[in-house]
Image (cartoon, coloured by chain):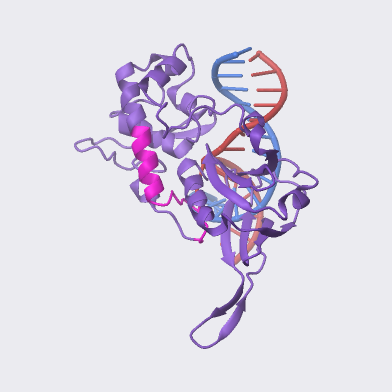
Chain colours: A purple, B blue, C red
Amino acid sequence: MPELPEVETVVQGLLPAISGRLIENVIINRPNLRWPFPLDMKERLEGNVVLNVRRRSKYVLVDLSRGETMILHLGMSGRVLIHKLGYEKSEKNMYFNKPSVEKHDHVIFDFEDKTRVVYNDPRRFGAIDLCRSVELNKHKMMSNLGIEPLSNQFNADFLVDNFKYRKTSVKSALLNQKYVCGLGNIYVCEALWHSGISPLKLAGSVKRKQLELLTLAIRKVLKEAIESGGSSLNDFKNTAGELGYFQHNFKVYDREGNNCKTTGCDSKIKKIVQSGRSTFFCNKCQR
DNA sequence: CTCAGCTCCTGCGGGC
DNA sequence: TGCCCGCAGGAGCTGA
């Protein structure tokens, strides 16, 4: 589910809700997600004030006052919801708002000000870990990440250098987080359509001019998706439980058999499988 | 080193 | 209606 825009949406929801707040109690409902949690995770979290919430690639990073950073990954189906516990006013009366624990609510963070953050992940491909903030870059989940696609370093020169001699497809190269990080299956398909590049082309054979268009398309698609609150296919929701709506702007993803949206193109969107992942594209517009 | 294929897990939609 | 199958936004391993 969550690629860069969805994770960014989560970060933007979390930041105002928990920064400066004290973590009072952490409820851990199972020992692991993809990997075991640190055995002392509860103790290491409780008593911290949240200094900052930020994003690196598809990871949410929560900087804590005692010098550690919590690394949070949403995998394919992870979701973060924020509730406010305590008395609330309805039209008729006051009631105590204590949300029930739902299926797959694996970790619950309760803050001193009655803010509750719930991490829910049905497929459990996600992860939560803690790391000394100063050593974050050495962490196994961080150490192999490439550059951020919305940073200044990301440009045609960078792609020319990194894709040179690559025998894999440009689609697979973009999914590989070690060159550019944060892109996933949806936004790679979309960006390739916008830049008119066939996903089947070998990464090393894409011309510089095309790579330039590709960098622009990637930035454009990511920025627009962030502005739309991400994409919700089945289940992505922001921290307030609301759906994103960038899926309405998909040009190719999940549109197999539908008309290509290029003006004057009468071709249908094709679906193929590359490295085990579905690729959607127009074989007329993308060469 | 590089790359394709497999794997973890639950839920959902389509076909019968 | 119900069952079975295939597939899903990620990414670490394995082995060629």
Looking at the image, which residue sits at the far right? Answer: A39
Residue A206 placement, left or right of A40: left
Looking at the image, which residue sits at the far top? Answer: A165
Give the tally of numbered discs: 0
- What is the span of residues highlighted in magenta in the rendered image? A217-241
Between residues A259 and A115, which one lies in front from this camera angle? A115
Q: Residue at x 59, y 49 (%)?
A: A51
Q: Could you tell me residue A139's position as x and y percent? A: 66, 32
Q: Is residue A237 magenta?
A: yes
Residue A281 placement, left or right of A1: left
Q: Residue at x 46, y 52 (%)?
A: A232
Q: Within the image, what quadrant is residue A17 found in?
A: bottom right
Q: Residue at x 50, y 61 (%)?
A: A240
Q: Is residue A119 above or below residue A55?
A: below
Q: Within the image, what quadrant is residue A109 found in?
A: bottom right
Q: Dividing the image into 4 quarters, which one contains the C terminus of chain A?
A: top left
Q: Is residue A26 magenta?
A: no
Looking at the image, which residue sits at the far left? Answer: A264
Q: Residue at x 31, y 34 (%)?
A: A194
Q: Is residue A110 above or below residue A223?
A: below
Q: Could you tell me residue C15's position as x and y percent? A: 70, 18
Between residues A257 and A113, which one lies in front from this camera angle? A113
Judge whether residue A78 can be spotted in this image: no
Q: Could you tell me residue A6's position as x and y percent? A: 48, 47
